[in-house]
Image: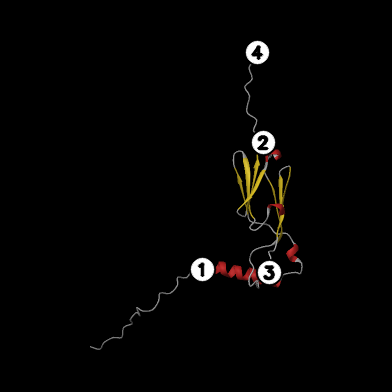
Amino acid sequence: MAALPTRRRDMTARPQRRFEPFREFDQLQAQMGELLESALSVPGADALPWTPAVDIEETDDAWVIEAELPGVDKKDVDIQMHESEVVVRGEIKERERKGVLRRRTRRVGEFEFRVTLPGQTDPEKIDAKLDGGVLTINIPKPPQEQPRHVEISG
């Protein structure tokens, strides 16, 4: 009887990297975004305001807005409140660099965020603080009118 050839696994070979399609799509999307941004960039487009990443949380007695503003100084932020609309404007200034900037993914320049809150606010008690690159705006709701018991006379 003749010996049949067998295939042996090379045990010294490194295992192949696991295929992760979502990571590949994320990388592809980031590269396409950079390509489109560079191809469609218009001179002076950096002057247009951009919108920071924002979370809005509603509690029983307030709305809490958190905006990511890394590197911004509190004197460069303006918060306006008109009825239920909140407008946050400001600027992240370009810092002076000593070397050659090889890649930029962080935004600089003017930013603006607008939101209309679904309900009444108490504009006299609004509180804002900037800590660790996160702007937190606490917008209280007006006190709810409590039902009042009415005594019947006579």
- Say which label, 1 or 3, has the lower sequence index: 1
The image quadrant of residue 38 is bottom right
Q: Which residue is mark 4?
A: 153
Residue 143 image point, x, y percent = 65, 34
The image quadrant of residue 152 is top right
Q: Which residue is mark 3?
A: 37
Secondary structure under the numbered disc 4 in the rendered image: loop
Towards the viewer: 49 or 151 = 49
Amino acid type, label 1: Pro
Secondary structure under the numbered disc 2 in the rendered image: loop
Q: Are marks 1 and 2 in contact (CB under 8 Å)?
A: no
Residue 21 disc label = 1
Q: CA distance from mark 3 to mark 2?
A: 44 Å
Q: How would you rate the neighbour count of disc 1 (Cα within 10 Å): few for under 14, some for 14-19, many for 20 or more?
A: few
Amino acid type, label 3: Glu
In the image, residue 94 above or below residue 116:
below
Q: CA distance from mark 1 to mark 3?
A: 24 Å
Which residue is outermost to the right?
Answer: 44
Q: How would you rate the neighbour count of disc 4 (Cα within 10 Å): few for under 14, some for 14-19, many for 20 or more?
A: few
Amino acid type, label 4: Ser
Amino acid type, label 2: Pro
